[in-house]
Amino acid sequence: MALKVGAEDKKKAIAAGVLGLIVLVLLARFLMDYFGGSSAPAPQPQVVRQTATPPATRPAQNEHAAAKLPGAVLGLDPTLHPEWMAQAESLEYTGSGRNIFSQFSAPPVIEQVKAPVRPGKQMPQVLQGPPPPPPIDLKFFGYEAHKDGARKAFLLHGDDVFIASEGDVVDHRYRVLKINPLSVEIEDIPYHNAQPLPLTQN
């Protein structure tokens, strides 16, 4: 039994050595091919030379190239001329109207309008003054007479009914001045407007 085990170990060792040798040969060939170990030289890539056009001669789409004027810079004189500056400073304003550079000059005379801006159409006249007082919105629908001659008026304001004598204030705004059989005179206190209200029958 011990001899058989030793023989099997030798076979396995030989097989492992053969496989290792094959792997080393393949690895050596791969490294030689990768690092240029082959005798045939690799073909050199062809270099295509193109002449680049300067960007100034190739304007982009929808753009125009700037035109260069020969000798434009040569005509400029950077020298200061004090006599020209003094001549410009000595100029005076000689216009026919108002001197806009002086705060003491008289304002120009503006001609008045002699005709309407749009002939044939007259602007509506705007009434000046305070607006008229609002009408008194009370209704007088009856009164009650007493034996001593005093009267009480029945007044309607919206859905509210008021019974007031002469001199009473109705709804914090209206004062009853005079009660007659067919009318009542009411004063609007904020506007100081007195107005007679006729008797209305429902």
Image: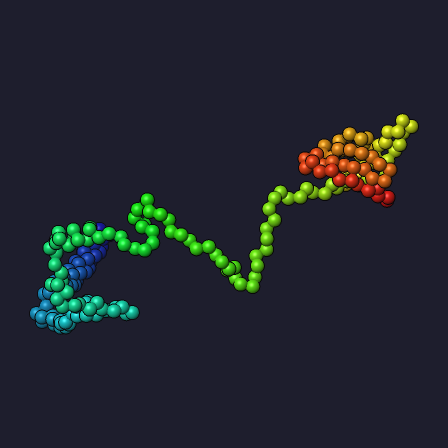
**Looking at the picture, does residue 110 appear above or below residue 129?**
below
**Residue that appears at 12% across and 66% down:** 71
Q: Is residue 18 visible?
A: no
Question: How many discs mark residues in the rendered view?
Answer: 0
* Residue 58 image position (x, y, % from top left): 21, 70
**Looking at the picture, does residue 102 appear above or below residue 71?**
above
* Residue 45 image position (x, y, % from top left): 13, 71
**Looking at the picture, does residue 64 appear above or below residue 146?**
below
Q: Is residue 172 left or right of residue 33?
A: right
The quadrant in which the C terminus is found is: top right
* Residue 164 image position (x, y, % from top left): 81, 32
Q: Nearer the viewer, residue 102 or 12?
A: 102
Q: Is residue 122 visible?
A: yes
Q: Nearer the viewer, residue 161 or 63?
A: 161
> What's the colour scheme?
rainbow
**Residue that appears at 68% across and 35% down:** 190
Q: Nearer the viewer, residue 134 or 163?
A: 134
Q: In the rendered image, which quarter is residue 46 located in?
A: bottom left
Q: In the displayed orientation, state which residue is furthest to the top.
A: 148
Q: Is residue 118 left or right of residue 143?
A: left
Q: Is residue 40 left or right of residue 109?
A: left
Q: In the rendered image, which quarter is residue 74 located in?
A: bottom left
Q: In the displayed orientation, state which residue is furthest to the left.
A: 39
Q: Is residue 31 left or right of residue 192?
A: left
**Looking at the picture, does residue 43 appear above or below residue 148?**
below
**Residue that appears at 80% across and 34% down:** 178
**Residue that appears at 75% across and 40% down:** 195
Q: Nearer the viewer, residue 88 or 71?
A: 88
